Structure formats: structure tokens, C-alpha cells
Image: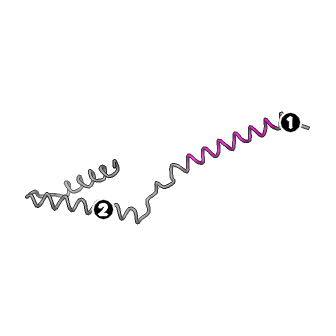
Amino acid sequence: MPIKQELHARLDALNAKITDARSELDFKHSLNDGHNLTSGELLARYLYLKEALDGDVAAAEAHGHRVGALEQDTMTWIEGIDLSMA
């Protein structure tokens, strides 16, 4: 029959393994939890960016500047960076 100290040592070892497993699961969960956008959130972000881009293009064209596809793509990219930094 195992002695009391041996049982406590085994129990402590089991507790350490469970704690490590929980920490790993919590870490993995934190990487994914809340970082996945829904289709509605993606659509809302797209519409917001499109509206902002359309306003920038309209302002530039109102001042006599022609805005091509490359400029629009660049402005969309910059707008996305600005929003992600906020």
C-alpha cells in the first residue's frame, strides 16, 4: 500500500499536468476567440470602406483630379491600414 507522501506526490503531478493542459487550451482558445469576423461584420466593413473611398474619389474629382483604378486600390489599402491602427 502506497504511503501518504507518495499519494500526495502523484496527486500533485496530476494537478500539474491538468494545469498545463488547461493553460495550453486557454492559449489556443485566446488565439481564435473573437477574432473571426462574421459575414455581416465583413459586409459592414466593406460598405464603410467603400463609402469612405467613394467620398475621397468624389472629393479628388471635384478638384479636377482623375482617380484611376490603381489610385482607388491604393486609397482602399491605406484606408484599411488607418482603420486597423485606430
Mark 1 lies on a secondary structure that is helix
Residue at numbered disc 1: 4
Give me the C-alpha separation between circle 1 and circle 2.
Answer: 66 Å
Q: Is residue 3 left or right of residue 68?
A: right
Dominant SS in magenta: helix
Compared to residue 49, the image places residue 21 above or below, namely above
* Rendered location of residue 18, percent (x, y): 69, 44
The quarter in which the N terminus is drawn is top right
What's the residue type where badge 1 is placed?
Lys
SS type, badge 2? helix
Q: Amino acid at mark 2?
A: Tyr
Residue 36: x, y in percent? Answer: 46, 57
Closer to the camera in the image, 62 or 74: 62
Q: Which residue is mark 2?
A: 48
Instruction: Give the residue displayed 75% in from the left and 38% down from the top.
Output: 12
Is 29 left or right of 2, judged from the image as shown?
left
Instruction: Write the residue at 25% across / 63% down.
Output: 51
Residue lying at the far left in this picture: please name it. 64
Segment colored magenta = 8-28
How many marks are shown on the rendered structure?
A: 2
